[in-house]
Image: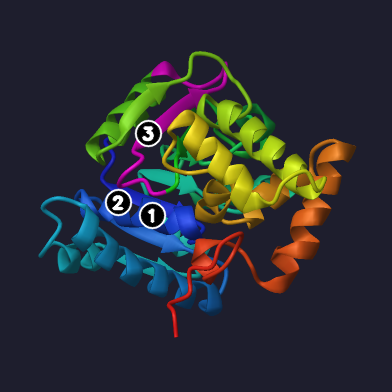
Amino acid sequence: MTEIRKVAVLGTGVLGSQIAFQSAYTGFEVVAYDINDESLQKARLRLAALVETYRKEVTGAAGLQADTMGRIILTSDLAAAVADADLVIEAVPEVLAIKQALYEKLARLAPSDTILATNSSTLLPSDLKDFTGRPDRFLALHFANNIWKFNTAEVMGTPETDPAVIDTILKFASDIGMVPIPIRREKAGYVLNSLLVPLLNAAAELAEGGYANPHDVDKVWRIATGAPMGPFQIYDMIGLNTPYNILSHSDEHAGSLAAWLKENYIDKGKLGIASGEGFYSYKPAD
């Protein structure tokens, strides 16, 4: 079975950048790919911010940031990104057609023994396996946002995934500091999002329907359950684009929630913590 030494992360958004940084922080050589120079420049800013975040929040991280950044290569050349990767982790937008088209390219470009993993939040790996050219070496590896702190890694194969590949990825997840959670059968949303998505949708329904404003919804949830964050704070942490993409490809009712998110927040540049504003403002006070 493949020994994981070099990792390619495809997509340098909020979570893709975190996956790349955490993998490099724990000693792996990483190539992070995105589609153009503009996206890569944003990735550089995210990675630089992670250096500071790890310094503040991760015990023992001080002094290791230079080594971490030295293990990350950024590129917009997909062929170069995956040329000698032992593991490719896909973290592109949660749109089925985008992911399928990417895997068709990977089927041609990645070495035949490379393991391919999707970080899809809600799609089944079976939706993608036939596009990979190697269904026996393909599975889902799902991370939670803020992975240095909320460090679960859900590992879910298809009926065609080689059990040895699953074992390899469970070990890799542990090696990068995650708590590996094997999912025994395919389930859209895994464990985390099977619980989280209904909560976020219910919160959006309350606000979109005018029953309560987002801050009051969060206040009730935090006070009544003892949770550290309310659902709209979680929206901001995730970033609103991913929930929007999920809602847009769900049923008609979810589509109305997607339209509400788009009109009132996304179209106004309120994308969550990463943009400085979402349901809350994260901009420094003047």
Q: Are marks 2 and 1 in contact (CB under 8 Å)?
A: yes
156 within the magenta span = yes
Q: Is residue 148 above or below residue 34?
A: above
User: Does residue 221 appear left or right of residue 173 in this picture?
Assistant: right
Give the class, few, some or many, for how many residues have Cα within 10 Å of label 3's Cα (few <14, many ≥20).
many
Residue 219 percent across, percent down from the top left = 54, 44
Q: Which residue is mark 1?
A: 18
Tell me which amino acid carries mark 1.
Gln
Q: Is residue 29 visible?
A: yes
Which residue is at the front of the view, 185 or 221? 221
Tell me which amino acid carries mark 3.
Thr
Q: Which residue is mark 2?
A: 22
Q: Secondary structure at mark 2?
A: helix
Q: Quadrant of the C terminus?
A: bottom left
Which residue is at the front of the view, 275 or 170? 275
252 within the magenta span = no
Bounds of the magenta span? 146-163
Tell me which amino acid carries mark 2.
Gln
Q: Which residue is mark 3?
A: 152
* Distance Cα–Cα, label 3 vs label 1: 13 Å
Q: Is residue 120 visible?
A: no
Q: Quadrant of the N terminus?
A: top left
Q: Secondary structure at mark 1?
A: helix
